Image (cartoon, grey):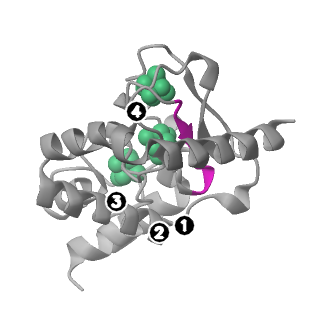
Amino acid sequence: MNRKALLHNLLPQTQCRRCGFADCEAYADSMNSGISSPNLCPPGGETTREALFSLLGMPVEPIRPIHKDEEVLTALIYEDECIGCTKCIQQCPTDAIIGAQSVIHTVVEQWCTGCSLCVSVCPTDCITLVPISDPALRISVNESGVRYSEMKERLAVHGRLDEQREYLDVEDRKQESLKDIVAAALERKRQVLE
Ligand code: SF4
Ligand code: SF4
Ligand code: SF4
């Protein structure tokens, strides 16, 4: 495995873009090229920062305040205010949001990395980040990376526009089954919050 791959493997695969890059792989590429400092990944916390400096053979630099280990968060959609616009789904790097056009959307906690990318795109401000109900539910770094890779492959095959078009057709083809999935997910979420 080359150094860029090793650097990439050390990153948390949250794909949150808070390092200033499009995803974890792009940041690993920049570090490997000597362009970026290894202390730009807030979700990685101290452990990741120290491992990155070590792999690059650089003296560990002091932690920045924003790079301390963070609380484990997950997205929560307030379904009463969801208008089913699908904007959040299009942002999610791990396909952790379920829903269809004009249908309530919900987050599958086990697949959410807490990246917050869905929060800012919601036109009704009905998505927020909350502490995860059980830290054991947090998606593993490996599974997060796999889900992101699969999403990128799908977009590469169909193209984002085609995928959106296909998604808009989902209501006709699968609305009833998606409604069942959403209803079950919402019920699980309600039970967790009670
Ligand atoms: S998890 Fe870290 S490396 Fe990956 S996109 Fe977020 S800030 Fe960048
Ligand atoms: S549901 Fe939102 S916070 Fe969770 S992974 Fe998807 S975009 Fe990120
Ligand atoms: S962006 Fe907001 S309103 Fe649109 S589907 Fe997602 S949660 Fe619902």
- Quickly name the residue at label 1: 140
The answer to whether mark 4 is within 8 Å of ligand 3 is yes
Q: Is residue 50 visible?
A: yes
Q: Is residue 106 magenta?
A: yes
Q: Nearer the viewer, mark 1 or mark 4?
A: 4
Label 3, residues with CA under 10 Å away: few <14, some 14-19, many ≥20:
some
Q: Is residue 18 visible?
A: no
The span from disc 3 to disc 2 (Cα, nearest Å) is 9 Å
- Which residue corresponds to the image point at 53% horizontal and 62% vertical from the top-left? 47
Q: Are marks 1 and 2 in contact (CB under 8 Å)?
A: yes
What amino acid is labelled 1 in the image? Ser
Locate residue 133, reporting x and y percent. Answer: 75, 47
The span from disc 4 to disc 3 (Cα, nearest Å) is 15 Å
Q: Are marks 2 and 4 in contact (CB under 8 Å)?
A: no
Mark 2 or mark 4: whose residue is earlier in sequence? 4
- Quickly name the residue at label 4: 88
Secondary structure of the residue carrying numbered label 1: loop
The span from disc 1 to disc 4 (Cα, nearest Å) is 22 Å
Q: Residue furthest right?
A: 194
Mark 3 or mark 1: whose residue is earlier in sequence? 1
- Disc number for residue 148: 3
Mark 4 or mark 3: whose residue is earlier in sequence? 4
Label 2, residues with CA under 10 Å away: few <14, some 14-19, many ≥20:
few
Secondary structure of the residue carrying numbered label 4: helix
What amino acid is labelled 2 in the image? Glu
What amino acid is labelled 3 in the image? Tyr
